[in-house]
């Protein structure tokens, strides 16, 4: 059983062992923090947790990741179930790969996840020859599954701990150094997330073409969703300012124009978008390209509230989900959703 769980072997070169340790730390922590942790933040509200208990509630508006899961066909018993499973798989699996514990098993489940992303989700998959990072991560986790943790891993220590002490010469300073490396890398990643920033340059994709899509909003009077065909044209009107021009088609003969202005703070930590919104989460390793979450105080239906906007932007897709939580409310609800393609 021990061999099955912790099987690994050192390389013939100590230099190769050190290189493999650094590779594992980077690969594991980048997935655990950059992918798993960032999603856990967005999947941890009371409202979304409640959706796990019932497949029926999966028809309510999901977040960006649950949408992807549902689009892949993982709808039974609920796309929220699979979204949580995948997210925890990224977070826990990444940490296991980083510290070298159950390394092959952590790598295997992540390889399966990226197999689906690289060859099923990706628009135009190109096995072997495709130069896109989802496929690169798939092969990286295949490599981890094949090689295991290596010499400097908890797997290797656990595999040999029943041997004589002389068989493994691991000193306390070496263990402390490894622990400090893991803790330091994790702390640095979390610190970077805590200070997430953005800039006009990250929205350059919006400027390249006109966009066609829809606006779906919750009507204040009827409390029912309304969907309007919408087009968008974006221009940069100042070094730190974007102007979004919308055309909403209400009927075959009637269109309404609208305009939003986005002003980016000098330090990149805020965007003024009707009200000041802080950058609370940012991921650039998602299949969409840029995933950004903004939050801040505002007003909705003439009542004070907290506004959260979730942005996903890639070469061919742009979406913005506006969620609102009133001061006396416990949960966010979706006020409107823009979905554009070109």
Image (tube, rainbow, N blue to C red):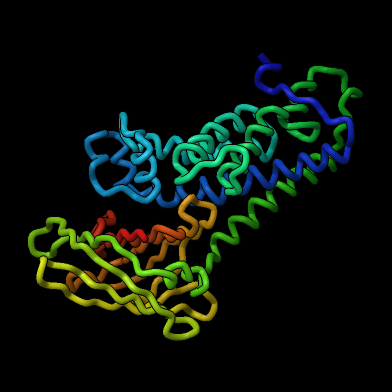
In which quadrant is the C terminus drawn?
Answer: bottom left
Q: Quadrant of residue 56?
A: top left
* Residue 280 as seen in the image, left or right of residue 56: right
Front residue of 275 and 164 = 275
Considering every residue shown, the one lying at the far top of the view is 1
x and y, in percent, of residue 287 in the image: 48, 50
Q: Residue at x 44, y 51 (%)?
A: 41
Q: Residue at x 31, y 70 (%)?
A: 232
x and y, in percent, of residue 82 in the image: 39, 35
The answer to whether 173 is drawn above or below residue 241 in the figure is above
In which quadrant is the N terminus drawn?
Answer: top right
The answer to whether 234 is drawn above or below residue 109 in the figure is below
* Residue 198 as seen in the image, left or right of residue 43: right
* Residue 206 as seen in the image, left or right of residue 131: left
Q: Residue at x 62, y 55 (%)?
A: 189
x and y, in percent, of residue 133 in the image: 59, 48
Front residue of 214 and 322 = 214
Front residue of 202 and 163 = 202
Q: Residue at x 88, y 30 (%)?
A: 12
The answer to whether 301 is drawn above or below residue 116 in the figure is below
Q: Quadrant of residue 21?
A: top right
x and y, in percent, of residue 212 in the image: 30, 63
* Residue 298 as seen in the image, left or right of residue 301: right
The answer to whether 255 is drawn above or below residue 87 in the figure is below
């Amino acid at each position: 059983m021990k061999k099955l769980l912790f099987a690994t072997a050192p390389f013939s070169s100590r230099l190769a062992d050190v290189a493999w340790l650094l590779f594992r730390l980077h690969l594991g922590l980048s997935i655990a923090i950059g992918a798993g942790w960032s999603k856990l933040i967005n999947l941890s509200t009371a409202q979304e947790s409640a959706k796990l208990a019932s497949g029926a509630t999966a028809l309510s508006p999901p977040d960006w990741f649950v949408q992807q899961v549902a689009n892949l066909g993982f709808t039974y018993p609920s796309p929220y179930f699979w979204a949580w499973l995948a997210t925890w798989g990224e977070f826990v699996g990444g940490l296991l790969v980083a510290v070298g514990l159950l390394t092959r098993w952590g790598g295997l489940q992540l390889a399966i996840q990226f197999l689906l992303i690289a060859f099923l989700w990706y628009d135009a998959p190109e096995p072997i020859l495709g130069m896109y990072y989802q496929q690169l991560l798939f092969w990286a986790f295949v490599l981890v599954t094949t090689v295991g943790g290596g010499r400097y891993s908890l797997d290797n220590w656990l595999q040999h701990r029943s041997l004589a002490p002389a068989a493994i010469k691991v000193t306390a300073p070496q263990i402390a150094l490894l622990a400090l490396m893991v803790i330091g890398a994790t702390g640095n990643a979390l610190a970077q997330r805590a200070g997430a920033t953005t800039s006009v340059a990250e929205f350059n994709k919006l400027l390249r073409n006109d966009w066609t899509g829809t606006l779906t909003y919750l009507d204040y009077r009827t409390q029912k969703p309304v969907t309007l065909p919408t087009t968008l044209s974006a221009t940069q009107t100042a070094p730190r300012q974007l102007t979004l021009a919308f055309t909403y088609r209400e009927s075959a003969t009637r269109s309404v124009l609208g305009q939003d202005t986005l002003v980016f703070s000098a330090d990149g930590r805020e965007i003024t978008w009707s009200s000041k919104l802080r950058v609370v989460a940012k991921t650039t390793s998602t299949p969409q390209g840029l995933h950004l979450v903004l939050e801040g105080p505002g007003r909705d239906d003439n009542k004070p509230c907290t506004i959260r906007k979730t942005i996903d932007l890639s070469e061919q897709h742009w979406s913005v989900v506006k969620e609102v939580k009133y001061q006396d409310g416990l949960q966010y609800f979706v006020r409107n959703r823009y979905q554009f393609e070109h």
